[in-house]
Amino acid sequence: MGGRPPQRLRAPGLALALLTVAASARGDGPPPVVVGPLSLSAEQLAERLGELSPLELRAHGAGPAGRLAYVQRVIVPELLFQAEAERQKLAEEPHVRARLRDASFQALVEHERAQLPPPTDAEIDAYYDAQRRDFERPERILLWRILVSSEAQARAVIEAARGAGGPERWRALAREQSLDTATKERGGDLGFVHPDGHTDVPELRVDPALFEAARGLEDGELVPEPIAEGDHFAVVWRRGSLQPVQIPKDRARPTIVRAIQEKKLGERIDGLVRELGAKYVTERRDELLEHVDVPPFPQSRAAAP
């Protein structure tokens, strides 16, 4: 087939790009990588190479030959595609403009993130103390409860819930007999109950005696005796549990640092929006939005997964 080696890329400017990089490797100075109307300076190329991991660097090879391979495989195609995109004026396409806006916004956000000082030890201590419940939690038990008016009625519910099909009968009994209107329609499900009686639903608290009665049982066991709860009696079914959580401050530190930094970043972005608004927004007329018609969403895009 002619004996010529295959060429992966053929385009105007490619030979010049490889020539200039080869000249730089010989020590004749740092000319840029040039492809058609576009170029990449020696400093920019060094920066790009510095972003590569050791594994990526080894994939292209060592020394000047490796740098040349990186330019040929990565930089030259990139500049070629960029030149062709500019020729086709793709930046004027609505979906491309949207992606460019997103990229600009994300670049600015990352720039602002880089300016944030690391949290101080005092800030980390304050966050850990304020959010201690996220890092230290006691055992929690998932409880179902049916609240009835008499001990005899409670014992009848216990007997009816035993055996095969118990959960289905329990749900029916809860809807029919439970005095707790907040939970009867969901089968008396209290969620995870803490030792002091509070649950993961802030407005729902129960008598701590329910937790104590279920503590010594296995998941899935009915509490065998009714539990007095005020003027009523509770039938309790232990459905599951979560073990205690104890995360010391040193282990929680990375999570805390991220949370503090994200909060600071949000505040910084909000402040930047106000600052730029005062700088660039000269007039605001919200009433004009009433005259903006939203185009219909294309049916083909709406049906896409």
Image: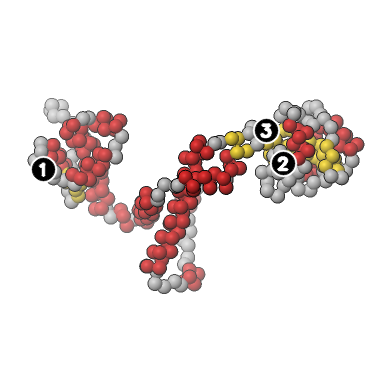
Mark nearer the N terminus (2 vs 1):
1
List the residue tagged with mark 3: 241
Which amino acid does the dot numbered 2 rest on? Asp
* Residue 32 spot, x, y in % from top left: 16, 46
CB under 8 Å between discs 3 and 2: no
Mark nearer the N terminus (3 vs 2):
2
* Residue 301 spot, x, y in % from top left: 46, 50
Observer able to see residue 173? no
* Residue 161 spot, x, y in % from top left: 81, 32
CB under 8 Å between discs 1 and 3: no
Picture quarter with the N terminus: top left
Rendered view: 18 above or below 277: above
* Residue 44 spot, x, y in % from top left: 22, 45
Mark 2 vs mark 1, foreground winner is 2
Mark nearer the N terminus (1 vs 3):
1
Quadrant hosting residue 93:
bottom left
Rendered view: 282 above or below 156: below
Inter-mark Cα distance, 1 to 3: 70 Å
Secondary structure type for disc 1: loop
Rendered view: 106 above or below 45: below
Residue 29's mark? 1
Secondary structure type for disc 3: strand
Which amino acid does the dot numbered 1 rest on? Gly
The residue lying at 88 percent from left, 43 percent from top is 149
List the residue tagged with mark 2: 196
